Image (spheres, rainbow, N blue to C red):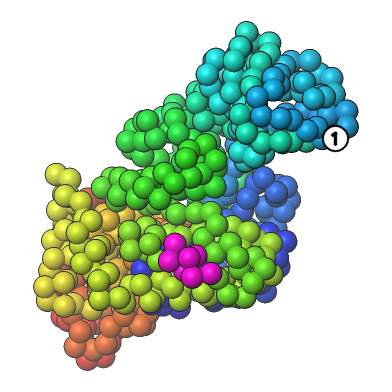
Amino acid sequence: MRRYRKVKILATLGPASSEEDMIQKLHEAGADLFRINMSHSSHDMMRTLISRIRSVEERCGRPIGILCDLQGPKLRVGKFAAGKVTLTAGQTFTLDNRDEPGDETRVFLPHPEILEAVKPGDRLLIDDGKLALKAEQADGTKIVCTVVAGTSISDRKGVSLPDTLLGVGALTEKDRSDLDAALATNEVDWVALSFVQRPDDLAEVRKIARGRVGVMSKIEKPQALERIDEIIELSDAVMVARGDLGVEMPIEAVPGIQKQLTRACRRAGKPVVVATQMLESMISSPVPTRAEVSDVSIAVFEGADAVMLSAESASGQYPVEAVAMMASIARQVEHDPLYPSIIYAQRATPEATGADAISLAARQIAETLRLAAIVTYTSSGTTGLRASRERPNVPIIALSPIVQTARRLSLCWGMHCVVTQDATDLDDMVNRACRIAVSEGFGNPGDRLIISAGVPLGTPGATNMLRIAYIGSDGQTGI
């Protein structure tokens, strides 16, 4: 099943899309990976969804990636005696450590780490910013605030802290349990870590994962932007989580941050996902707004590796239509006359490594000679990532003997992943590449390919060879 686009689509599963036949329809409509949101999934449901995805994968014969999205710390106020209270701008309102129902003057905050970290002058945003407070006094047991904007607060509303660096890590006890359950299946390819603030937040999850899954950092906090280069370096991929980012940052700053993160990830050769509210109106409408179409197209023009659907595919009324629309937008953008020049202008200088030099040369040769495809043999996935980083205007076929590698690379821009046995010698390498290019719809007899691999064959991280090959007249061998 060849995709006639380079950008990938990540679809969230949920009540509207948890059955196996619906998962297959989403995949056929264009979903390359599926996201399981652990904020709303039990371990049993996660395992059920994984089993259904793998059944679809077996039937379709194409690697499908699975992302397990950890919930992260959920910071919420306590309850009110009346369930809800009305506030006025300028009044004093206190958050404290007294486990008692709240009223118009105070409420319980069951998070000592917030009480200890907030300083006078810090902002506290309640219920996605609908209520804005400013801390006037803080002594570790209570935070006395002034109401800046908003008129009400009710039970268990979320708290955002755009000005405060919390001392606790991003991985909660629930996240550890969910991560252990995901790793135990040996079927999850990516884990997304929520509310990353600092590079240290990645240390624990990487220690637990030990390379068994790719670690994706969700950028939702302004504190993360202050050390973004370090966070990108320690991450295997990055998600621009625009929902919470737009709560904790000025909403008008989010488009610029999206561009900065996309380009920083491209420079580093790390996959980047743009997420949240991309086709939000399709939760209840069979067609998106013109602004949403433009939003998706901007992410594609920027060269993002993947675009993500959340509620649109998880709980919306038109999940298949949303995926199909996203795929259609991506194809249209990638066929736009301006697209190649925009992608070319954003290319990063290759690093001084053999893999980067080989990938750069492969792209230049393929584009100069107008070859049918770039074929890269990759065991660990590193060679595939470097080929994707170059953003060539010809297809990339990634051949790997390791199914987990192929599934993980399904997130990466332009990668068509095929699981195949490793080549036994140079002739087999060429013949296998040509045969697969024809069978997968990327070439015909007489077309030329460029093949990158490592010699000796099968050695991870040893990409050091390029070879141009003609597809033979039988479509099974190369010359």
**View extreme (right): residue:** 82
Q: Main secondary structure of the magenta part?
A: helix
Q: Nearer the viewer, residue 442 or 275?
A: 275
Secondary structure at numbered mark 1: loop
Left/right placement of residue 455 relative to residue 189 reads left
Q: Nearer the viewer, residue 119 or 202?
A: 119
Q: Amino acid at mark 1?
A: Gly
**View extreme (bottom): residue:** 473
| Visible residue check, residue 420 | no
Q: Which residues are magenta?
A: 289-296
Q: In the figure, 249 relative to 111: above or below?
A: below
Residue 170 appears in which quarter of the rendering? top right
Q: Nearer the viewer, residue 326 or 83?
A: 83
Q: Quadrant of the C terminus?
A: bottom left
Q: In the figure, 151 relative to 474: above or below?
A: above
Residue 432 rendering spot, x and y as whole percentages:
29, 74
Count of numbered marks: 1
Disc 1 crowd, CA 10 A, few/some/many (<14, 14-19, 20+):
few
Residue 149 rendering spot, x and y as whole percentages:
62, 33
Residue 56 appears in which quarter of the rendering? bottom right
* Residue depicted at 84% across the width and 20% down the height: 100
Q: Is residue 104 magenta?
A: no
Residue 150 rendering spot, x and y as whole percentages:
66, 36
Left/right placement of residue 392 relative to residue 315 reads left
Q: Quadrant of the N terminus?
A: bottom left
**View extreme (top): residue:** 139
* Residue depicted at 26% across the width and 87% down the height: 444
Residue 5 appears in which quarter of the rendering? bottom left
Mark 1 sits on what residue? 83
| Visible residue check, residue 36 | yes
* Residue depicted at 27% across the width and 56% down the height: 389
